[in-house]
Amino acid sequence: MKRSGRSARYVFGVWGSIAAASGVAGLLGALLLDGAAPEVVAVITALAAGAILAMVADTMIPEAFERTHLYAGLIATVGFILAFSIGRA
């Protein structure tokens, strides 16, 4: 954003808004899904995880591919497996 000519105020405003919206969404999810069936929570969690993985892949992997070429996919996969393992531990 900065390279595109946006001011620091704009950049921080956008990211601050995203953080605030995420917090509100988390709070609403916790309140509305309290007592929901485990299957419903599992589907929502899987959808959210896929969205985050797609976002990271879309924004970070092209830059990583520029630097590591052959290992970008392997590194992303190992990172995902590691994060999943830590989350399940």
Image (spheres, grey):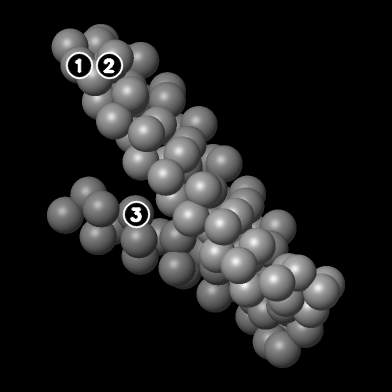
Q: CA distance from mark 1 to mark 3?
A: 24 Å
Which quadrant would the N terminus be assigned to in this image? bottom right
The amino acid pointed to by label 2 is: Leu
Q: Residue at x 45, y 60 (%)?
A: 80
Which residue is at the front of the view, 31 or 49? 31
Lateral position of residue 64 relative to residue 22, left or right: right
- The mark found on residue 33 in the picture is 2
Q: Position of residue 70 (x, y in %)?
A: 72, 81
Tag 1 residue: 34
- Whether residue 86 is visible, yes or no, is yes
Q: Quadrant of residue 42?
A: top left
Which residue is at the front of the view, 23 or 39? 23
The amino acid pointed to by label 3 is: Phe
Lateral position of residue 45 relative to residue 34, left or right: right
Lateral position of residue 85 relative to residue 77, left or right: left
Count neighbours of disc 3 (C-alpha within 10 A) and say few if under 14, some if 14 to 19, many if 20 or more.
Answer: few
Residue contact between numbered discs 1 and 2, judged by CB atoms under 8 Å: yes
Q: Position of residue 49 (x, y in %)?
A: 47, 42
Q: Residue at x 35, y 61 (%)?
A: 83
Residue contact between numbered discs 1 and 3, judged by CB atoms under 8 Å: no
Tag 3 residue: 84
Lateral position of residue 68 relative to residue 53, left or right: right
Q: Earlier in the sequence, mark 1 or mark 3?
A: 1
Q: Position of residue 39 (x, y in %)?
A: 32, 16
Which mark's residue is nearer the viewer, 2 or 3? 2
Which mark's residue is nearer the viewer, 1 or 3? 1
Which residue is at the front of the view, 10 or 51? 10
The amino acid pointed to by label 1 is: Asp
Q: CA distance from mark 1 to mark 2?
A: 4 Å
In the displayed structure, 34 sits above or below 14; it is above
Residue contact between numbered discs 2 and 3, judged by CB atoms under 8 Å: no
